[in-house]
Amino acid sequence: MPFMDFWSINLPKVDVAPVTPANYALNPVVVANLPSNAVISRVVAALQVDYQLNQSAMTGTLSGSLAVDADSGFASTLQALSIPSGSFYTSPLDLGSPSLLLEGNTDVKSEVTSNGTYYFRLENAVAASSGTMNLYGVSVRLRVYFDVSVEFMDFWGTPQANLTIPSAEGNVALGSVVVSGIPSGASIQRAVLMVKASIIEANEGNFEQLGAASASTVVVVADNAEFTGKLSGISIMTSNDPRLGQLYVEVISCSYRQGGAFFVGDVDVSSIVAGDGTYYLRFENIKARFDGLILYEVQFGVRVYYQQPSTSGAAVAVNADGSLSINLCPKNRVPVNLVI
C-alpha cells in the first residue's frame, strides 16, 4: 500500500519528571502534498528519541502514551502509541540506548483525515525513578497510507567520516547528492531532506550543544554549488540555555561521546529537487555553544516521492484451471486483480 511519511521538527529536550504523571507537548506534524484524489486507508504514528539521560541514582524507566489531536488545545486526543512501564531502560546516572524508534499500532485516521497540522504530546508520562528522565532529540512521524499509487526513492551522498561544528557561527558543507533513475514522465509529489550522525563528541570536558545563532539554524539544498536560489529543508532548534540546545552532549563517566542524531525535513523541497540531477546540502547559521562539536559517520540525503505517468486499462488472462484473471489498472491507483 502506498504511503508518505511526515516528520515534526526535532525537539531538543523533554524532561519527564518522576512520581506524578504529566503531559508534555511535542512539536506538531504538518501533512502536505497528499494526492488530491487520495483516499486515506490507515495512519500510524511513531516516536523517535535520539537518546535519553537518567538523572537518578537508581535504574530509570518511563511510561505513558503518545497522543495526537487535530486541535492544538487537545480537546479530544487519540492515543497513537502506548509506552508501557519499563520502557527507556537506563542505568543510574547514565545514558540510554541511542536512536529509539517506537512504532504505533493504532490507526489514527479518524483524527488525521487530510492535509493539515496535527498536534502531539506525551500523556500521563512519568519517570519510574527518583530523578528526572531527560529525552533528547524527540520527534514524531506520521505515516499516511492511501489508495493512490505514489512511490519513493532515497538518495544519499558520500558519508563523511567526521564533521566539525565550530564555535564561530557559519556554514558547514555536507556535500552533494546525485538523484537518478526517476521514471521518465513521473510527477514529483514531495521531496524531503535527511541528515544523520552515529556519534556526537564534545571537544572539551564540558557539556556541549548547538548554540543560538544570529539567524535560524537550518539545512539548505540547492541545485548549484554556489547555493544560489537555495531552499531551507530542515529547521534545527537551538538555544544558549544550558542543556536545551540540539546535539547536546553530557559528560558521563568521563566520556564526551554519545549516540548521534537523526533529522528529517518537515518542508517540501521539490521546487529545487525537481528530478534527476546533482543537489548540494549544507548547514547554515550553525555554531557550537562552547569549543566545538564533532559529528561522526555523517550521512545526508533526500527522499523523493513521485507518481508514474497517468495510465488506465485492463488485461485479461486465462488461467490453467479455466478461470479468468482480470487486472484492472485505474488511473493513478493501485492495480486490482480479479479472478473469475
Image: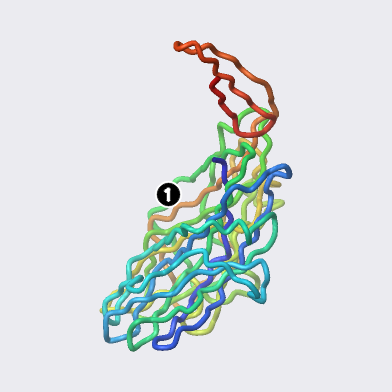
Between residue 178 and residue 167, name the one nearer to us: 178
Quarter of the rendering occupied by the C terminus: top right
Q: Is residue 33 left or right of residue 321?
A: right
Q: Measured from the top left, where is residue 277 in percent x and y?
A: 61, 37
x 62%, y 52%: residue: 221
Q: Residues within 10 Å of mark 1 (few under 14, many from 20)?
A: some
Q: Which image quadrant for residue 240?
A: bottom right
Q: Which image quadrant for residue 217?
A: bottom right
Q: Is residue 116 above or below residue 189?
A: below
Q: Measured from the top left, where is residue 138 in percent x and y?
A: 49, 69
Q: Is residue 324 above or below residue 208?
A: above
Q: Is residue 116 above or below residue 77?
A: above
Q: Measured from the top left, where is residue 284 in percent x and y?
A: 60, 63
x 42%, y 66%: residue: 50
Q: How is the image coloured?
A: rainbow
Q: Is residue 38 left or right of residue 45?
A: right
Residue 240 in view, yes or no: yes
Between residue 235 and residue 36, name the one nearer to us: 36
x 42%, y 81%: residue: 126
Residue 4 in view, yes or no: no
Between residue 148 and residue 261, name the one nearer to us: 148
Quarter of the rendering occupied by the N terminus: top right
Q: Secondary structure at mark 1?
A: loop
Q: Measured from the top left, where is residue 326 in percent x and y?
A: 59, 20
x 62%, y 40%: residue: 147
Q: Is residue 293 above or below residue 340?
A: below
Marks counted in the figure total 1
Q: What amino acid type should be assigned to the residue bearing mark 1?
A: Pro
Between residue 172 and residue 12, name the one nearer to us: 12
Mark 1 sits on what residue? Answer: 159
Most extreme residue toward the right is: 36
